[in-house]
Image: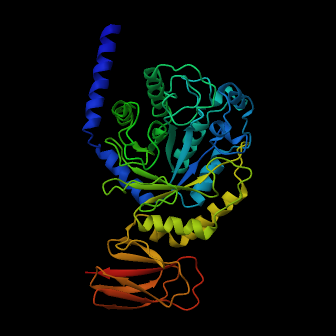
Amino acid sequence: MKKFFLFFYCLCISCFVFAQKNYTPAPENLQARQWFADARFGLFIHWGPFSIPGDGEWVMNNRNITVKNYSRLMDFFNPIQFDAAKWVGMAKDAGMKYITLITRHHDGFSMWNTKYSDFNIMNTPYKKDIVKLMADECHKQGIKLYLYYSLLDWRRDDYSWSTGRTGKGTGRTVQGNWNDYLSFMKNQLTELLTNYGEIGGIWFDGHWDQTAPEGAADRSAKIDWHYDEIYGLIHKLQPACLIGNNHHMTPFPGEDFQMFEKDLPGENKSGLSYQEASDKLPVETCETINNSWGFNITDTTYKSNEQLLHYLVKASGLGVNFLLNIGPMPNGEIQPEFKDRLHWMGDWLRTYGESIYNTNAGYLKPQAWGCLTQKTDKIYVHVFDNKRASVILEQFPFKKIKKAYLLKDKTAVKTQLKNDMAQLFLPDNIDEPDEVIVLEVKN
């Protein structure tokens, strides 16, 4: 009987592999993609024992902390101020529609009650399942939960660390079995997609550890990640669960959305984004409020409210989601500089959210003066430059502007449409960081 079960299991896995190579998303997956594309704004949370040293989430790698010494952080990770209801409520107040939570970062610490690693939240003084607390609260408050999961591991011997580019100084001397690591990941992903209700998506990171540096001509992986098996397993367990992979390349078969890191599509300010934006999948970009993902006690380079707003609006103008990160403190509190900025964004969206949610990319890419977002019969003109007297929209694709007005108070705006060019005459004394003009249009 055991032999038959093993044969049947292997046969099923092989079918999942084949199915993933010829992946056809389920109807509920396509619906989830559309929801995701319409949501536009989400919260990224980088948090775990790496928060304790106050030097970002890469502290184990950057300081070459050995596995033995780093593991001691588990013994005093006790976030007694953590309150899932407040965290989720803060995201809702900010106008965010989903949360992407770190479940396991490159340091290998699992933030849930896993059976497959002792290095987890249940063996800390806190002894509470963070993923469950967040999942329950997200479901209660109507926020979708996405889970970040690291493919690489600076702690385990069976991760292929000898071929990786990072984690070289953590004291490992034995190279374990790669197949054991793959089984470990599949077991953990099964837990996450079985025990915590509906999960909006899995956000993979770390593929790049096994490739040549960004920009190299050949960036094929040095190892076989067995994505057919991993992606097939995810889509089997939850067909609507979206898969994204932060590999900085063209999406692989089986992936449901594409991501950019610290860049808008078409930019490469971070040196990470050489890929072209997909025209078939939803796209997301992620960015930090200061310059750190995890808690960094010395990083006070906070972006202004205006900078964050313009990032969100330009992302929407490109048809892209904005995943804005916070790095909570090790005790579970969120520093006021983050909370204040999120609340400000929420206030803005309560007035102007119509021009962000459920919109498409503007027919023009973002300009020096601002950008456009669109719906079927409306164009939202986002004016960042409040010193301008007018804005000209070239190659205007509609034959008639029925109405033009400020979104905030319906004040009429004078327009002129001539020779496929629309000119908008801006009101005097604009003092908004983004003055939104609505054009009701018709062909």
| Left or right position of 442 against 267 | left
Mark yes or no: residue 389 visible: yes
Q: Quadrant of residue 65?
A: top right
Q: How many marks?
A: 0
Is residue 411 placed above or below 342 in the rendered structure? below
Which residue lies at the image location 68% right of the left edge and 60% below the top edge? 301
Q: How is the image coloured?
A: rainbow
Which residue lies at the image location 44% right of the left edge and 65% below the top edge? 316
Q: Quadrant of residue 127?
A: top right
Which residue lies at the image location 46% right of the left edge and 61% below the top edge? 264
Q: Position of residue 332 (x, y in %)?
A: 70, 44
Is residue 119 placed above or below 333 in the rendered structure? above
| Left or right position of 119 against 10 | right
Q: Position of residue 320 (x, y in %)?
A: 42, 60
Q: Quadrant of residue 15?
A: top left
| Left or right position of 388 against 69 | left
Quarter occupied by the C terminus: bottom left
Q: Position of residue 229 (x, y in %)?
A: 35, 30
Quarter occupied by the N terminus: top left
Mark yes or no: residue 200 visible: no
Q: Position of residue 353 (x, y in %)?
A: 49, 68
Which residue lies at the image location 72% right of the left edge and 45% below the top edge? 54
